[in-house]
């Protein structure tokens, strides 16, 4: 900038504050990762480097079941919420602005605004009622709940992508004999794809590490990885938890990196 | 060119908005565009020319009136079912497709067999001289090349009418002039009816078979470039196309009396006050004492290279501009404050309506 405008980086102590903030963010995670390789059983003592807790977690049937359940729920929830979010994004951007647009926007993003614990309790009561009446248990309830709170996370990148898209492209497709459906399939969707994939991955990650809603909604024996870990905490704390957390962290980082690269690469 | 109409608009009205705040972008426009002609809609921005184009393309529906294509009513047909293609001002090339895929798009949507699509695409690439760029992404092309892809894409399905919405406005002057020639060549080679929208009068004059001049949602005059330039129907057309002078005069049987009191031979159809127009290049300047010439004083001289604009003042302070071709020496031999005798070239004076 040519003008000497206000620059936060010039304030005294800027680098100190920044450093402290980063330390607060990353020291706990770093500690977690380091201690997942600790051969000792208690947190305080460092023995030697070891893969022991990873092996222990790998051999634990409960961990395997919970992981599989987490992945199943996250996959379904990500796909469903992204499909719904795509439709919502198209519905809110592909038309002239209308009365109550902001209201609709807030409605779609409800899971971001309403405290998660409220949604959790509400879902527990509603699903509990349905379970009692129908006698049907199963993962469906968890998938449904996760789909609902994943929608805004999928919606936001898709909407951003749609808003950046030149509407003339759709007009041009129609001009070149494309039916409305062909226009969507051949022009809108391919251009939207980076946003859709970003939304899919964000939804997947958000679903994968949800604790609160899952804890309230799950039936007996439906532990996901995070709720399994929470359960372990109540009994005995072993670095096995650290190993599992590190595993989750790796999955999340990989997905978020992919998300970042995808949203940045195009245009 | 035949006398059949490719496009006919009858009493078309397009209003945007509701009730009192409604704006009439098109106000009772009727026009006939002949098969195989290069027809230009010319006018300042906001005159309704692009709206008319969008109605022909089917992107908008008229509030009133009918649009015919080859005699068939297409007023409410969606754009994908009209044999009409558009070259957009922003080109609107599909960013996720290659040059060849862009050109093939319309043919594929028409359900043409793959072999035909390929052959036609190659033909189009050759027509716009982009064979070597077939597999590039469109973002890797220059503005002029993107323009040619947009043209090839719109021409590939062999539309009955090609609509061009200010396609040259994003190009620099040299490229624009080259593309004007290119466009005219393509139109002649393909024989397709072109409807071209522009605000650039020079573009309109050089390329068009006929021009429709628009302003305020109304079609002001339709005619060939020469008709529009030499016989403008009203003040707006006269001043929008080229430069011109206006004179107020009293018509009196075979003569008109100018505000300066000078009398000029001119066969006005009616008596009374008339507005006359005369192009700057149709003024003849001679010696001040020339018999029958109008006395004028030179108030300013502006040198333009090929010619010099001589600003004149008549006895009643009426101002006129004469354009005099510059001689080899560059000095037209006039000086500020000098007296000259002014004559109008035969047939140069025109009556215009308001």
Image: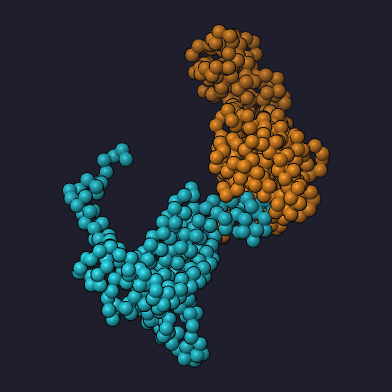
Q: How is the image coloured?
A: by chain
Q: Is residue B115 left or right of residue A210?
A: right
Q: Is residue A195 above or below residue A83?
A: above
Count of number-bearing discs: 0
User: Residue drawn 70% across and 20% down?
Assistant: B346
Q: Quadrant of the N terminus of chain A?
A: top left
Q: Can the viewer see residue A108?
A: no
Q: Is residue B345 above or below residue B128?
A: above
Is A199 in front, or is A256?
A256
Q: Is residue A166 above or below residue A105?
A: above
State the image quarter where residue B5 is shown: top right
State the image quarter where residue A3 is shown: top left
User: Residue drawn 22% across and 45% down?
Assistant: A10
User: Residue drawn 18% across and 50% down?
Assistant: A13
Q: Is residue B22 left or right of residue A157?
A: right
User: Residue drawn 78% across and 41% down?
Assistant: B35
Q: Position of residue A263 (x, y in %)?
A: 45, 54
Q: Position of residue B145 (x, y in %)?
A: 60, 36
Q: Position of residue A79 (x, y in %)?
A: 51, 68
Q: Is residue B42 above or below residue B107?
A: above
Q: Can the viewer see residue A137?
A: yes
Is B333 in front, or is B306?
B306
Q: Is residue A29 left or right of residue B293?
A: left
Colour of the chain lettered B: orange
Colour of the chain lettered A: cyan
Q: Position of residue A15 (x, y in %)?
A: 21, 50
Is B45 in front, or is A35?
A35
């Amino acid at each position: 900038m040519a003008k000497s405008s206000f620059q936060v980086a010039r304030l005294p102590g800027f680098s100190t504050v920044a450093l402290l903030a980063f330390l607060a963010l990353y020291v706990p995670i770093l500690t977690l990762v380091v201690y997942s390789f600790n051969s000792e059983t208690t947190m305080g003592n460092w023995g030697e480097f070891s893969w022991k807790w990873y092996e222990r977690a790998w051999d634990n049937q409960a961990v395997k079941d919970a992981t599989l359940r987490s992945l199943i729920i996250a996959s379904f929830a990500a796909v469903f919420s992204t499909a719904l979010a795509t439709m919502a994004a198209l519905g809110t951007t592909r038309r002239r602005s209308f009365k109550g647009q902001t209201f609709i926007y807030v409605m779609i993003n409800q899971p971001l605004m309403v405290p998660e614990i409220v949604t959790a309790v509400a879902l527990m009561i509603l699903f509990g009622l349905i379970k009692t009446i129908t006698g049907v248990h199963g993962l469906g309830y968890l998938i449904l709940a996760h789909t609902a709170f994943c929608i805004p996370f999928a919606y936001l990148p898709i909407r951003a992508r749609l808003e950046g898209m030149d509407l003339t492209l759709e007009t041009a497709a129609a001009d070149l004999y494309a039916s409305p459906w062909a226009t969507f399939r051949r022009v809108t969707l391919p251009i939207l794809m980076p946003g859709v994939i970003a939304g899919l991955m964000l939804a997947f990650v958000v679903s994968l590490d949800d604790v609160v809603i899952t804890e309230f909604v799950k039936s007996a024996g439906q532990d996901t990885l995070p709720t399994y870990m929470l359960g372990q905490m109540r009994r005995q704390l072993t670095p096995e938890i650290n190993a599992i957390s590190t595993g989750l962290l790796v999955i999340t980082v990989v997905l978020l990196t992919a998300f970042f690269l995808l949203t940045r690469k195009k245009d | 060119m035949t006398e059949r109409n490719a496009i006919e608009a009858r009493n078309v009205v397009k209003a945007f908005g509701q009730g009192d705040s409604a704006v009439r972008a098109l106000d009772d426009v009727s026009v006939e565009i002949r098969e195989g002609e290069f027809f230009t809609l010319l006018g300042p921005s906001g005159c309704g020319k692009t709206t008319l184009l969008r109605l022909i393309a089917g992107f908008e529906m008229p509030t009133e009136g009918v649009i015919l294509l080859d005699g068939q009513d297409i007023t409410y047909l969606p754009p994908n079912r009209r044999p009409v293609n558009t070259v957009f001002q922003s080109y609107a090339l599909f960013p996720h497709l290659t040059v060849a895929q862009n050109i093939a798009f319309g043919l594929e949507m028409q359900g043409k067999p793959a072999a035909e699509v390929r052959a036609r695409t190659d033909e189009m690439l050759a027509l716009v001289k982009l064979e070597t760029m077939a597999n590039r992404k469109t973002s890797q092309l220059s503005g002029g090349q993107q323009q040619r892809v947009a043209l090839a894409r719109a021409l590939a399905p062999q539309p009955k009418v090609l609509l061009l919405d200010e396609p040259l406005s994003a190009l620099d002057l040299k490229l624009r002039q080259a593309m004007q020639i290119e466009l005219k060549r393509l139109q002649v080679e393909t024989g397709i009816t072109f409807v071209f929208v522009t605000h650039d009068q020079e573009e309109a004059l050089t390329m068009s078979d006929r021009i429709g001049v628009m302003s305020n949602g109304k079609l002001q005059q339709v005619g060939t470039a020469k008709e529009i330039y030499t016989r403008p129907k009203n003040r707006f057309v006269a001043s929008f196309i080229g430069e011109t002078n206006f004179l107020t005069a009293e018509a009196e049987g075979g003569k008109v009396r100018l505000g300066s009191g000078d009398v000029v031979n001119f066969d006005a159809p009616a008596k009374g006050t008339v507005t006359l127009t005369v192009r700057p290049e149709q003024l003849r300047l001679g010696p001040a004492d020339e018999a029958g010439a109008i006395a004028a004083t030179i108030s300013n001289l502006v040198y333009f290279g090929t010619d010099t604009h001589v600003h004149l003042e008549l006895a009643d302070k009426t101002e006129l501009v004469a354009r005099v071709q510059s001689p080899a020496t560059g000095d037209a031999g006039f000086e500020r404050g000098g007296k000259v005798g002014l004559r109008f070239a035969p047939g140069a004076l025109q009556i215009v309506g308001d």
